[in-house]
Amino acid sequence: MSIVILLAIIGILVAGGFLVAFLWAVKSGQYDDTESPAMRMLFDDTKPVDKNIKS
Amino acid sequence: MGQKCIHCGEDCGSHPVIWDDKPFCCHGCKTVYQILNEKKLDKYYEIQPMSGIKVEQANVGNKYAYLDLDEIKDKLLGFSDGDISKVTLFIPTIHCASCIWLLENLNTINPGIIASNVNFPQKKATITFNNKQITLRQLVELLVSIHYVPEITLDQLDEKMSGKSSRDLLLKIGIAGFSLMNVMLYNFPEYLPGGEQLSSLFTKFFGYMSFILALPVVFYSANDYYLSAIKGLRHKMVNIDVPITLGIFTLFFQSTYEIFTGQGIGYMDSLVGLVFFLLIGKWYQSKTYEALSFERDYKSYFPVAVTLLKNSKEETIPLSKLKENDHILIRNQELIPADSKLISGEAEIDYSFVTGESLPVNKKAGEIIFAGGRQVGSNIELEVIKSVDQSYLTQLWNQEYHKQNNESQLNHLVNKVSEYFTFAVLSIAFAAGIYWLINDSSLALFAFTSVLIIACPCALALTVPFTFGSTMREYGRRGFYIKNTEVIDSLRKIDCIVFDKTGTLTVNRSMKVEFVGDKLTDNQLKTIKTIVANSSHPLSITLNEHITVETDYPVEKFQEIPSLGITGLVNGKRVNIGSRKFVTGKDDSEPFSTNVYVFIEDKILGYFKIENQYRPGLKKVINSLKKNYELYLLSGDNDSEKENLRPLFGKKAVLKFNQSPTDKRDFILSLKQKGKKVLMIGDGLNDAGALMESNVGLTIADDIYSFSPACDGIIESSKFHSLNKFIKYTHLSFKIVIISFIISFLYNVVGISFAVSGTMSPLVAAILMPISSVSVVLFATLSVKLSSKRYL
């Protein structure tokens, strides 16, 4: 039965990973604008855009 | 007719500008197309056809010269490191996928632009550029040349980005959600049949785990509620957050006690769930219209810089440096920033932003021009007589406003309920505690805390955010945008409505045109249309739109005489069109209406009577509002329209004319002193004082993203006919709140009956609390959704 304890710990680590991912996403501003990326992904990359400097 | 401009989709008329075999409505649109075509950016037209923006005049000249000034540049640039600068510009015309694509590919037009990023909901573009290759001014002028005109205003210079709070809320929700899922998992075995036989190792382990997971929720996610409760208590008010705080802490300490004494696993799942639901409600309520601004003052309207004339040399200075007695140069379409005296030039001042009146006013040298007007026509020179913040209109803003302590007033209802609620709960808790103290003292403390826990008004607290939040969304879908959910409750309580006339009851840009005289022949109509098509005076434009015949007559010797009229030879015939004085030679004897006289070849044919046009549906709106509200009309104009308005408003209504902005504000104040709750509906800067002073101030706007004075809500002008429905719906919305309150009370009665009998278990709490919250939320959102379909 003590395997349950191990499972619970693994469970919380996995969920914690997702939590960290979510916190990072919020902090890096990914939720500030949820509309334009949806349109942006439909554009073709016909022109090379300088990606070195990110805003 | 029939051909649509490739760039902006507008009708090209009979003589489209043709380039590259494609039709354009004007040279401005053609130029943009040329620029984009040259740089191989013509995909712009594929993503969304005819997505371009039409701009009336393309010539910018020195308009953006102020962007070369260091002190203005410093304020605008968000970040500057050596050659690399970053700027965020508000571009209200961003409207579709093509806009995003073009603005993010700006570097193909100018390699000095390194990267650009569009925030669509906020209508902002963040552009990183190399200031060795392109200056800020050139960048802005580039945007203007492709018709994406950024709005650069004074208050933008002062404000810095404020997106922090919504991120904080998301973080809190994320953490609470994470804890909730896990704690529920740990508590689940307890609720199964035979759960009490679980070995104490598990109970302890799961208990400790849920304690750890609850810590960040109690001490981080929920901290806003504690702060608000303390703030309320300091103002001697028991707001809804007091019982919530009480509930959270009782839950936490009771559970901690049970976990560490090995009595059980506690109520951590209910606690974390409670906080999670509350935060969701808060998030739902806080989703407002990002690109709309409800807090604008004159700073967002006035220009950033002015052209100073010094020893007959032009110099651009920031507006803040403008002093009395300075001489300034105002060009076509520029704003007059301070009260000043006209020195030279032909001044035609368009006060439409100030009063809603769209016809320009003629001023002669030596006359005083109030700030806020826009010059139409040639350049004029002015002498400033009052500094910017001392000017007539700006002073209205700088006066102190007593919008009585918003927070306490508006959430009045919930706070009242929660006050009684808190005292009721506390007394039940004490009564239960005392009862058990006498009968079975081991249960006394438990019964006491159980009451506090189960009575935690989660459902109660969710009612208002979800009901009013949904109502706000339904309003937004129908063209009525309100600042926050509290406006709904204020709007419900109003008992009198004050209207502005020009621009509010009348349509801003559209006029009623009527010809007085013998009926004009087709030939004559064509002649008139030909000549007015050459002039850019608002009256000419109105006439041009009014006359629908097609014409191809030639015009010679066209001449526009400022403030008098236009003249020329059409088909070889002399045509004069303009004021009575200009056409007939007699002095104007009818100052109250606008008449345009027509002279063709050898005789005066008559005149066009041009009047403001009332908004469609006005009669229906007023008639239905008349029954329940006292109506008032405050107009800055003379009373020439009184005869038309009186039957509409009925005998009881008070109609006041010749009201200055201060009069309007004072009138609202006097109504409020009589204990009235006032709704003010206006549109221009001259209503700004009245709008701020009223209980609810609404503005009517043709374009909701362009300037409107500070207010509580904005109605799209095309939706004015639904005004009465919007106001009426607040009552229904309020009824939904009351019913939701009753539902959540019923849950509380059930819960408290468990609690006082001392039989509450974690299982009861775990079932009752989410069910009550979810059912209240579902009831509130669904009933708003369904009823708004029917009544809005």
Image (spheres, rainbow, N blue to C red):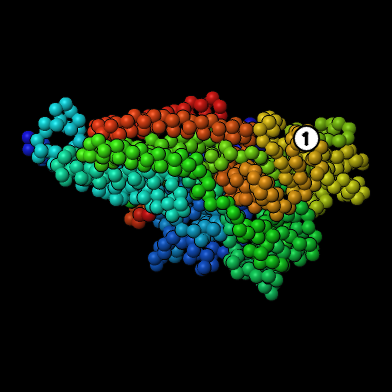
**What residue is pinned by disc 1?**
B651
Q: Position of residue B509 (x, y in %)?
A: 69, 42
Q: Position of residue B635 (x, y in %)?
A: 74, 46
Q: Residue at x 46, y 27 (%)?
A: B783
Q: Residue at x 9, y 40 (%)?
A: B201
Q: Tag 1: residue type?
A: Lys
Disc 1 is placed on an element classified as loop
B299 or B416, nearer to the observer: B416
Total number of numbered discs in the rendering:
1
Q: Residue at x 48, y 65 (%)?
A: B74
Whether residue B533 appears in this view of the structure is: no
Whether residue B736 appears in this view of the structure is: yes
Horizontally, residue B113 falls left or right of residue B751, namely right
B504 or B255, nearer to the observer: B255
- In the image, residue B319 above or below residue B558: below
Check the picture and name the quadrant holding the C terminus of chain B: top right
Check the picture and name the quadrant holding the N terminus of chain B: top right
B30 or B89, nearer to the observer: B89
Q: Chain of mark 1?
A: B
The outermost residue toward the front is B438
Horizontally, residue B457 falls left or right of residue B652, namely left
Q: Residue at x 58, y 51 (%)?
A: B403
Disc 1 crowd rating (10 Å Cα; few below 14, some 14-19, many 20+) is few
Residue B369 placement: quadrant = bottom right
